[in-house]
Amino acid sequence: MAGLRVIIDLHAAPGGQTGVNHDDGTGFPLTFYVPRYRQLTVALWRALAVHYSNEGVILAYDLLNEPISPYSDEDYLNPRLEPLYREIVAAIRGVDTNHLVLLAGAQWSTSFAVFDRPFDANAAYSYHKFWAKPTRDAVQSYVNFSNRWKVPVVIGETGEYDDSWNAAFRGLNERFGIGWVFWPYKSLDTGTAVVSIPKPAGWDLIADAGSGDVKTLNPDSLPPRQEALTILNAYLGAAKFENGRVNGSYLNSLGLAAP
């Protein structure tokens, strides 16, 4: 056993919880607008909890990733986030009293203003933050929340910056007892990940096609199907661990040692 633990993260709730493409939704956080999607989200978490209730490898259930983007109707949606969490947690606790639940704030998981008094004894609160100045004001609101309610706080996503920032921001969070998750583990042609995937020849053709405006995209400008398939297969091969580059300095910035 490698000693790894797993956090189950609902990145795409039925209907979409963010209001943008993070959740493969329609552009609106329909999880909060359509009762059927809300019911499906609750039922999904209950089913997951039934399946994993006695699984010790599972560290926590992260109920919603980055709910309610800043581009949505915050005044309407923000008061509806914690009630949805309460409903999900009640469904989970009906079948699983073992596992920690993670409750992410609103607006890309940055705002804890949506939360009231904690309602579950086995919960932690999760914030996400990227590229912030690594000084106390970046974490003060989360520290205040933790101190007020005597609850644990974790930063569920951060990183994608240079090694010196990693070290400073990691140290800042650790100073206040905030656990951290830096990401991504593996990414394409970068030093800002544990493992860098070598970029296969022709990848820019795929990237350009993927980032094009579908409304004005000319099919004749796309790479031929067989060429695109060859490039994508080359990417799958490059993504294998043995073909990647371990970024030792990135690991060092997190207080870890490269093998």
Image (cartoon, helix red, strand yellow):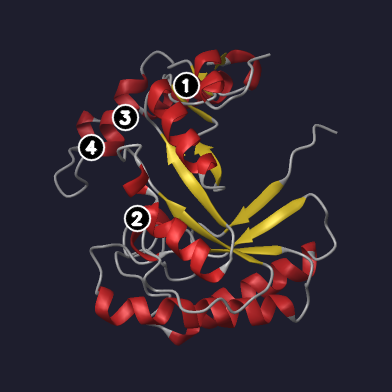
Structural distance between the alpha carbons of marks 1 and 4: 18 Å
Residue picked out by circle 4 = 219
Return the disc, 2 or 1, that comes first in the chain's sequence: 2
Q: Amino acid at mark 3?
A: Ala
Q: Secondary structure at mark 3?
A: helix
User: Is the residue marked by circle 4 packed among few (<14), some (14-19), or many (20+) residues within 10 Å?
Assistant: few
Disc 2 or disc 4, which is closer to the eye?
2
The numbered dot on residue 230 is 1
The spot of residue 11 in percent (x, y) is: 50, 57
Taking depth in this image into account, of 153 and 212 the one nearest to the observer is: 153
- In the current view of this chain or complex, which residue is farthest to the bottom? 35
Q: Foreground mark, 2 or 1?
A: 2
- Which image quadrant for residue 93? bottom right
Q: CA distance from mark 3 to mark 1?
A: 14 Å
Q: Is residue 71 left or right of residue 63?
A: left
Quadrant that contains the N terminus: top right
Q: Say if 9 sits above or below 122 in the image.
A: above
Q: Residues within 10 Å of mark 3 (few under 14, many from 20)?
A: few
Which mark, by number, is residue 114? Answer: none
Residue at 65% x, 15% y is 242
Residue 49 in the figure: left or right of residue 204:
right
Viewer-side label of 2, 3: 2
Q: Secondary structure under badge 1?
A: helix
Q: Nearer the N terminus, badge 3 or badge 4?
A: 3
Q: Is residue 38 left or right of residue 160?
A: right
Per the image, the residue denoted by label 2 is 21
Query: In this view of the protein, can residue 230 be seen by the observer?
Result: yes
